[in-house]
Image: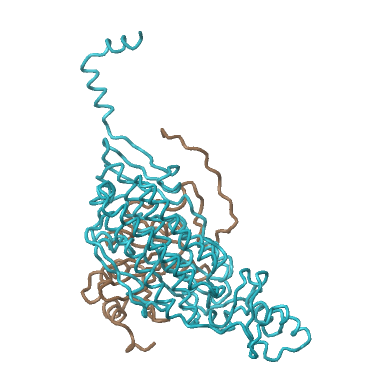
Chain colours: A cyan, B brown
Amino acid sequence: MSDSTTITTKTPEETKQEVEKSNKNMMLNVGPSHPAMHGVIQISVELEGEVIRKADIEIGYLHRAFEKHSESGTYTQVFPYTDRLNYVSPAINNFGYAGAVEKLMGLEIPERCKYIRVIMSEIARVADHLTCIGASAMELGAFSVFLYMMKAREWLYELTENVTGARITISYGRIGGVKADLPKEFTEQCRQALKKTREVLEEVDGLLTRNRIFMDRMRGVGVISAEDAISFGITGPFLRSTGVAYDVRKAWPYLVYDRMNFDVPVGTTGDNFDRYLVRMEEMQQSMRIIEQALDQIPEGPTNIDHEGRVIEPDLMADLGKFGKTAGLLKNETLLEPTLEGTGKRVHLQIRANDKDAWIPPKEQVYSNIEALMNHFKIIMLGHGIRPPKGEVYNMVEGGNGELGFYIVSDGTDRPWRVRCNGPCMRPMAALAGIITGGQMADIIATFGSVNMIAGELDR
Amino acid sequence: MPEAEWSKTLKKIQEQFGDRVIEMHAQLGQDTVVVSKAAIFELARFLRDDPDLKYNYLMDLTAVDHFTRKPRFEVVYHFLSLEYNARVRVKVPVGESDPEVESLTPLWKIANWLERETWDMFGIKFKNHPDLRRLLLYPEFQGHPLRKDYPVTKRQPLVGPKDPQA
């Protein structure tokens, strides 16, 4: 047999050399086509056995030129792109961008709208953390946790769908407001969904928090010090796990966060397990905020006219055709799905009452000339929303940390420059250093706790 | 804006870097300083280390192409001080013929990636950067897409599979 001949022809010295040669460091590319890398990250590692000696992170596989495209459309046309930045919590991106333009224009948005934005942001944040913990637990083998958490996320996405008409690519923000009001039954649905989500979190807490296998995989792994985290500019749960209590909602309150009671949970060691605990607690705090906001939210005008009748849009259009437009501007109507898409009211409580930014409700556009002109001025090419010349940086607390938009306006209807400063890039830049010296298998746990969202990282 | 209403940060910068400051304002309540290219490294270190300022975060680093203006580019830095809860924006005008700025990598670790991205998108070089490669795009990409003279519809040459041995 050929096998036996090869064995006999080797001297012990040759065998030893061969073994040494094969023990040399091995280069391994993890991803981009690797399920744990979510298909968009390449980590090139140099392995000595199981230990990582060197690592290099390659990003950019999902680059879609967000910033370039933003420059070629109008201010409103940027919204669909912002949905696709962090596609797990798109509401926060929407409002972050809208807030930047509003700051630039000096627009004050109505109270009710501020509350709606807070509620939608916090729902998005809970969904974001659910996805992060669920996915990283699954990658460590806890598949049932993933299923439980996706189930809870689906309840929240259903809520989002009821409000915005879509689960993920919602495009719900508008400059000066939001697309449509909360549906009538929203408060009840929301409280129900939060109750059920809390039950899921309790279940997951029982499954993971004191689970020996999970703790062994997470504790003391992927450690980063507070100094390093600050030098890498890391914010969000990743920073808070190191013990630094920086949260944009507390430090730079926007919307109505200064009226909410909530705590900023922090960790102590900055390892994967702390990040898990911080995220778990943040979900509880977010739900606290939502409940407070639901209690405090001011009621908007109802969809009845001054005589207490509900006016349907087609009736209003008919009145307009016959010139009976007196008082029509003050009326509110129930919008049909064909007019606004979701069958909801649009009223002054959810949009800034400023002709520079406000698109009037469709039934008014169809029924009176003032609203038609206003609509025309906002929509037509070369008119549109025109913030004054200048620049602004606006930040909100995204799911993963500070999400900033830097906008430069040249006074036309198109932004001169839109810069999205996403929170994901910073822990990704730090990741190579964190995983070096650790085990190959720990990449999965650490990478999971970064909660890398490629849409925002690669833009 | 009258000088008396300036924030602590602007006053300090005026004191220390008065001769190299080109412009200063606090439009929309956001402190902004425009300084000459030669001063940026020193200013950044001053902002980080001064006990009254302690801007320990490099929050953002990007550029703007003003195209018709001279100098053409502006590198924009956003700093955040956790301790004093303050922010400042620093801008550095950079000419088209010699787009190069001092790198901040010795001061902040994140400057490495942010500067790589700015190089990638605008073609602005960073002096003393340890590893100035493209960050988001691939090495064969031609041009710098966020420059205003880069057409949004421009096609790039296709790159075939690479030889793993090479």
Reply above or below: A67 against A340.
above
Can residue A77 be seen here? yes
Residue A440 horizontal/vertical position (percent): 30, 41
Can residue A171 be seen here? no
Which quarter shows the N terminus of chain A? top left
In this rendering, position of residue A39 left or right of residue B81: right
Task: Identify which residue, A334 or A425, lies in the foreground.
Answer: A334
Residue A304 horizontal/vertical position (percent): 62, 85
Task: Identify which residue, A380 or A424, lies in the foreground.
Answer: A424
- Which residue is painted at 35% across and 10% down in the image? A2
Task: Identify which residue, B157 or A89, lies in the foreground.
Answer: A89
- Which residue is painted at 24% across and 26% down in the image? A20
Task: Identify which residue, A137 or A211, lies in the foreground.
Answer: A211
In this rendering, position of residue A197 left or right of residue A331: left
Residue A397 horizontal/vertical position (percent): 39, 68
- In this rendering, the count of numbered labels is 0
In this rendering, position of residue A183 left or right of residue A210: right
Tell which residue pokes out farthest to the right in this image. Answer: A322
Residue A309 horizontal/vertical position (percent): 66, 86
